[in-house]
Amino acid sequence: MNAYIESFLPLFVAINVPGILPMYLGLTETLTPAERRRLTFLATATASLIAVLILFAGQLIFNLLGITVNDLRVGGGLILLVLSISNLIFGDYRRRDPLEGEDGEAGADIGIVPLGIPLIMGPAAIASVLVSREAYGYLPTLTSLVINMTLVYLVFAFGPYFARFVGPAVSRAVAKVASLFLAAISVAMIRAGIVGMLAAM
């Protein structure tokens, strides 16, 4: 039982569901409930698929591509930095429907990037999966993944009800503050990646 608990807790902290909830609300504030449900499912499904892939073939993929977790930190940080700046500066302009691709088909869905990865399954969560697999094995790590993804889905599903309770003005204010913190988090990710690269040289 200790292996399951010790595998669950680091991943829970790495995903940080309460921390990414305001960002999720900010990205989906213009969507209908049906669209938000679809986006929530796609985001958690994407994160789960990436997590399982990392669990069973992560080190092999990293070796084949010649990348490290530090490379993911820098890449993910740059994506989040661009997203946060866009939300802070251009948030009042009408953005393209996040559920619609270039030709009107689903394809450029924000449920995949940035919600699924790197917000839910970011570099810290990926590193946590790899470390947990080495320390506790496949079954405890897979169990912790299932529990954490279920928690993410439930928090995202019930988050909008909280937003409606506090009102649209407060929700927008929280979304703006979340974008500011997201910018800071992205810079921290980039810094950690660069420091890790330099330390490995």
Image (cartoon, grey):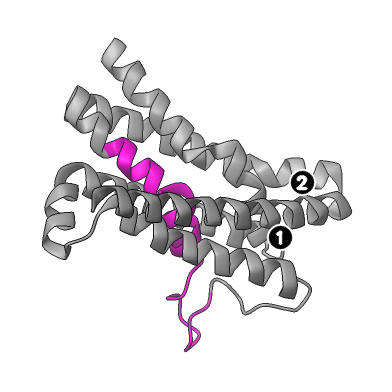
User: In the image, what residue type sits under mark 2?
Assistant: Ala
Quadrant showing the N terminus: top left
Q: Which mark is residue 66?
A: none
- How crowded is the residue under tag 2: few (<14 C-alpha within 10 Å), some, or many (20+)? some
Q: Quadrant of residue 106?
A: bottom left
Query: What residue is shown at x 63% (from left), y 63% (from top)?
Result: 84
SS at circle 2: helix
Q: Nearer the viewer, residue 99 or 62?
A: 62
x, y percentage for residue 181? Answer: 66, 51
Pointers 2 and 1 in contact (CB under 8 A)?
Answer: yes
x, y percentage for residue 97? Answer: 61, 76
Whether the magenta-drawn stretch holds residue 184 is answered as no
Q: Quadrant of residue 31?
A: bottom right
- Residue that label 1 marks: 29
Instruction: Answer yes or no: is residue 94 visible.
Output: yes
Query: What residue is shown at x 50% (from left), y 57% (from top)?
Result: 115
- Residue that label 2 marks: 163
Q: Which residues are magenta?
A: 100-129
